[in-house]
Image (cartoon, grey):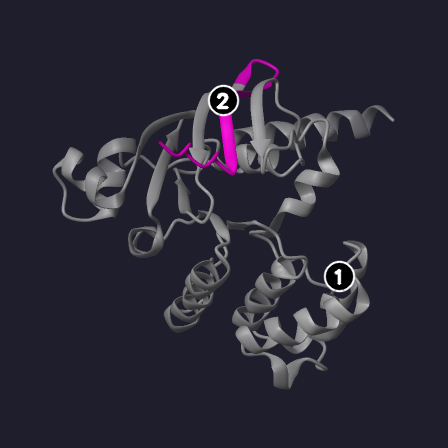
């Protein structure tokens, strides 16, 4: 009997507290290599806090994380080389061209020049920006920026791509094309995709498994079809509302608590 492949993302009893607030509460899950995994939840459920811990931006209170076998607490460089990320908020340099943004990223990650240039050409072709590579990013549309951010996140050949609400504010046509790029890359390069989105139809269409987090706890983890069957609903959005309720939520409480804490520290300086 062949041994099973170890998960590329492995999370055990992950907890994050901000003072008396528990933003993430003993969360456990794993993601297989090459899987497209959706991490869904209402505002304030703990999604952003979890992603920050997975990507070395936030230190857990307790629990264990392994990203490609590495510990984000003690092997940050190895973990960061294992993933690319497209943030919810824009993170490109508007005063640089598309080519220069990619070049800077490749240099920072130590990608050798010949390999870097070849990869840049390949990725610009994949995301349909070859003819705009010498244009300043400040003249790009929202969709073009997202496509460039995906190219940048893939430049150093990561094994995992984190997508934190990458289609927020994009029109349906651009959203559809963006997910086509991502699923093609997943199929051709075997890259693992970890995504968050508030567009349920996106997760329904491309994710192989879906975790639903609410009040810091994972309350469901299965395929879209299985979640619909378990909740007796016809769509993933209906299943999501059945699991989490229909009340309007505030923004990520953990992030807000952090901002308040930093604000207090700043005022004391």
* Cα–Cα span, label 2 and label 1: 32 Å
With 107 as the anchor, is 40 left or right in this view? left
Q: Is any part of residue 255 visible from this angle? A: no
Extent of the magenta region? 1-21
| Residue under the image location 54 percent in, 78 percent down | 128
Residue found at x 41% / y 45%: 37
Q: Residue furthest bottom?
A: 131
Mark 2: few, some, or many residues within 10 Å (few <14, many ≥20)? some
Q: Residue at x 60, y 53 (%)?
A: 89
Residue ranking furthest to the right: 269
In primary-sequence order, the first of circles 2 and 1 is: 2
Q: Is residue 8 magenta?
A: yes
Crowding at dot 1, Cα within 10 Å, few <14 / some 14-19 / many 20+, comes out as many
Instruction: Check the image and report above or below for 203 versus 93.
Output: above
Reading the image, the residue beneath label 1 is 106
Q: Which residue is disc 2 drawn over?
A: 12
Measuring 60% from the left and 32% from the top, which residue is drawn there? 53
Instruction: Kindly state the secondary structure of the residue where label 2 is placed.
Output: strand
* Quadrant, the C terminus: top right
Q: Which mark is residue 268?
A: none
Q: Nearer the viewer, residue 66 or 218?
A: 66
Between 258 and 57, the residue placed more toward the observer is 57
């Amino acid at each position: 009997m062949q041994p099973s492949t170890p998960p590329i993302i492995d999370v055990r009893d992950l907890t994050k507290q901000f003072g008396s607030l528990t933003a993430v509460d003993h969360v456990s899950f794993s993601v297989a290599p090459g899987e497209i995994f959706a991490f869904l939840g209402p505002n304030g459920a703990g999604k952003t806090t979890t992603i920050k811990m997975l990507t070395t931006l936030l230190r857990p209170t307790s629990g264990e994380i392994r990203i490609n076998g590495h510990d984000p607490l003690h092997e940050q460089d190895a973990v960061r080389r294992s993933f690319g990320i497209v943030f919810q908020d824009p993170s490109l340099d508007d005063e640089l061209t598309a080519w220069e943004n990619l070049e800077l990223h490749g240099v920072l990650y130590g990608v050798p020049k010949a390999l870097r240039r070849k990869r840049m050409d390949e990725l610009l072709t994949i995301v349909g920006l070859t003819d705009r590579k010498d244009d300043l990013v400040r003249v790009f549309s929202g969709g073009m920026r997202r496509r460039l951010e995906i190219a940048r996140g893939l430049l150093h050949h990561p094994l995992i791509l984190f997508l934190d609400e990458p289609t927020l504010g994009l029109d349906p046509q651009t959203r559809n094309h963006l997910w086509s790029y991502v699923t093609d890359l997943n199929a051709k390069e075997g890259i693992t995709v970890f995504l968050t989105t508030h567009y349920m139809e996106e997760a329904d269409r491309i994710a192989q498994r879906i975790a639903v987090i609410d009040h810091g706890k994972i309350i469901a983890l299965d395929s879209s079809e299985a979640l619909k069957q378990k909740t007796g609903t016809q769509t993933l959005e209906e299943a999501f509302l059945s699991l989490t309720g229909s009340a309007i939520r505030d923004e990520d409480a953990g992030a807000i608590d952090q901002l308040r804490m930093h604000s207090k520290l700043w005022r004391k300086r």
